[in-house]
Amino acid sequence: MYLSREEEAVYQGECGETLSRMMQILVALGDIYGAERLVAVKSVQIAGVSYKNIGPAGLEWISGLSGQVAVPSILNPAGMDLLRWKEMGIDEGFAERQQQVVKAYEKLGVSIDCTCTPYQIYDRLAAAGDHLAWSESSAVSYANSVIGARSNREGGPSALAAALVGKTALYGYHLDGNRMPTHQIDVQADLRDSDFGALGFLAGGMVKDGVPLFRLRSPPGRDSLKALGAAMAASGSVALYYVENATPAPPDRSDGGGPGLNLEKISLDRKDIDEVYEQHPSQGSDAVAIGCPHCSSGELVRAAQLLRGRKVKANMQLWICTARKVAQANPDLVAAIEESGARVFCDTCMVVSPATERFSRMLTCSGKALAYLPGLAGVEAGYASLEECIEAALEERRQ
Ligand code: F3S
C-alpha cells in the first residue's frame, strides 16, 4: 500500500511508539484488503467498550496507549449505565473495571458519550460522502445507507488506530464499486414500527453480507430505517442497504445500467413478517427492553405516552436504553417514563451489559436485540411491537 512521506515517518516511529503501532494496524488491514492508500476520516466510532466483551486484556491494551485522537471520536455503549449501574444490578468489581476502560479512552481524547447512535446527538460527525471509521454495526449501516457516508465495519483496535492517526485504509465500502446493490427485495405489505426490525431480521439472514435494495409500499422514517439496518447487520452482516425513495441512491453503474440490473430478486409479504412474531412469542418474559439501537427523542415520546398513568408489574423490569445526551435533552420524558417504574438507562444496552444475564426471557421490539440476545447475553428473546412490549410489562389497567 502506498504511504506518503509523512505516513511513512509515522509508520517508522518518528512520531512515537503508539502512533507507529496504530499505523501498522492500518497498513496491515490495507494490505489484507488490497487498499491502494489511506484516506482521511471525518470521525470515528469505537466499539470494544463493554468490559464484558474486552475483559482484562482489552483494558490493559487501551491503558497502554498514549497520545490524542486526531479526529472527533466517540465510544460505543459500555457494559453499564456509568452513573446508575447499581440500579442495573452491576457488581462493584465490574463497575470499577468498566470505569477504568472509559477513563482510558477519555485520556486519549475520545468523547465518552457511549452510544451506538452518534448521528442522533451530533450532526458534525458524518455527512453524505464523508469517509468514516465507525465500529458498531447498526451505526455503520445507518452512516452508509441513510446518511450516505462511507465506512467499513471497523473492529475496536482498527477504529482506535483510525482515531489516533485520523485515517483509514481505502477499501470496501469506501469505494463505489463495493456499494452496488446485490439483491432487490420487494415487500408486499404495509409496515409499521417493529415490522421494520422483523423485516431486517428476515432480510439479513437471506442476503448475508450483500447490499439489498428495498422496494416498499411507502417510504419509512429515520427511526424505521435505523431499526431495519440494525436488524440486518445482526441477523446477517449487511453494512449498506438502499430503500427506494427513502435513502440516497446507489452509485451509477459503470455500464450505464440501472440499479435493478442483474439483482437477485426476493419477495416478502405480510405472512413472512408475521412469522417473525409468531416464532418469538412474548410469553414467559421476565423483562422488556426497548432502545436497540438507542432510542431517539421521538421514540422516548412514544414510550412516555404508552406509560402515562400506568405501573410496571412488581415482577417485571422495563428498560429503555438511550444516549445520555438524548436523556438529558428530554428530562420531562425521562421523568414521565420512570414514574411508571420503567428505567431509562444511558451509556449501555441490553446486549452488551452483563446485567441482562439474570433474566431468562426478554421481550423486545428490536430485530437486532432479537438476533443477539440469545447468543451474546444467553437470554431467550420474544418479539412484539413497541405497544405490546410495553403493555406486557404493565399491571392491568384500573377500571
Ligand atoms: Fe446499540 Fe446495543 Fe443494540 S450497541 S444497536 S443497543 S445491541
Image: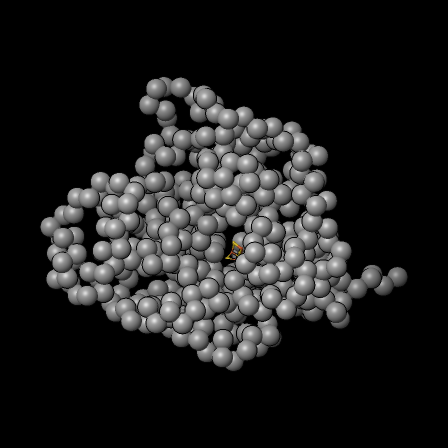
- What residue is shown at x 45% (from left), y 72% (from top)? 98
- Residue at screen point 36% across, 34% down: 178
- Front-most of 20 and 109? 20
The one nearer the camera, 4 or 125, is 4
Left/right placement of residue 38 relative to residue 385 reads left
Quadrant in which residue 215 is drawn: top right
Q: Which quarter of the rendered picture does the C terminus lie within?
A: bottom right
As drawn, 51 above or below 296? below
Image quadrant holding the N terminus, namely: top left
Q: Is residue 162 left or right of residue 55?
A: left
The x and y percentages for residue 317 are 68, 66
Residue 77 position within the rendered picture, expressed as x and y whole percent measured from the top left = 48, 62
Q: Residue at x 15, y 62 (%)?
A: 13
Query: Is 352 above or below relative to 150?
Result: below
Examine the rendered structure and indicate whether residue 393 appears above or below residue 131: below
Q: Is residue 346 visible?
A: no
